[in-house]
Image: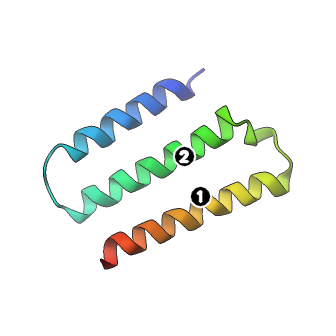
Amino acid sequence: MWVFPVLVLATLSSWLLGIEGSTSTLIGCAVVVIALIKVRLVGLHFMELRNAPAALRGAFEVYVVATGATLLTLYLVL
């Protein structure tokens, strides 16, 4: 199962980016994108949405993209 090690590496990488203490916009966006990738991996593999009906999986994918776009927009604007 390759998903768990990827999630651990993603968590460590976002943590390492965050402890730099920098307020760089690029680092903040990178942490948000890493979190969204983790959400997608958990949804598809641990909640087994990869084998779900197309409508349910599509709704999940739209949710992840919409949430990501909203969070990144708010982060960049505010």
Callout 1: helix, strand or loop? helix
Residue 51 on image: x %, y %: 81, 39
The quarter of the rendered structure image containing the N terminus is: top right
Q: Which residue is most to the left?
A: 21
Q: Residues within 10 Å of mark 2 (few under 14, many from 20)?
A: few
Total marks shown come to 2
Residue 29 on image: x %, y %: 34, 60
Q: From the viewer's perspective, is 48 left or right of 18?
A: right
Residue 75 on image: x %, y %: 34, 69
> What colouring does the structure picture have?
rainbow
> Quick check: marks 1 and 2 in contact, CB under 8 Å?
yes
Among the two numbered marks 1 and 2 on one chain, the one whose residue lies closer to the N terminus = 2
Q: Which residue is most to the right?
A: 53
Q: Residue at x 54, y 46 (%)?
A: 39
Q: Which mark is residue 8?
A: none
Name the kind of residue labelled 1 in the image. Val
Residue 49 on image: x %, y %: 74, 42
Q: Residue at x 69, y 37 (%)?
A: 47
Q: Which residue is most to the bottom?
A: 77
Q: To which residue does mark 2 refer?
A: 39
Name the kind of residue labelled 2 in the image. Val
Q: Quadrant of residue 48?
A: top right
Q: Residues within 10 Å of mark 1 (few under 14, many from 20)?
A: some
Q: From the viewer's perspective, is 8 left or right of 46?
A: left
Q: CA distance from mark 1 to mark 2?
A: 8 Å
Callout 2: helix, strand or loop? helix
Q: Which mark is residue 64?
A: 1
The quarter of the rendered structure image containing the C terminus is: bottom left
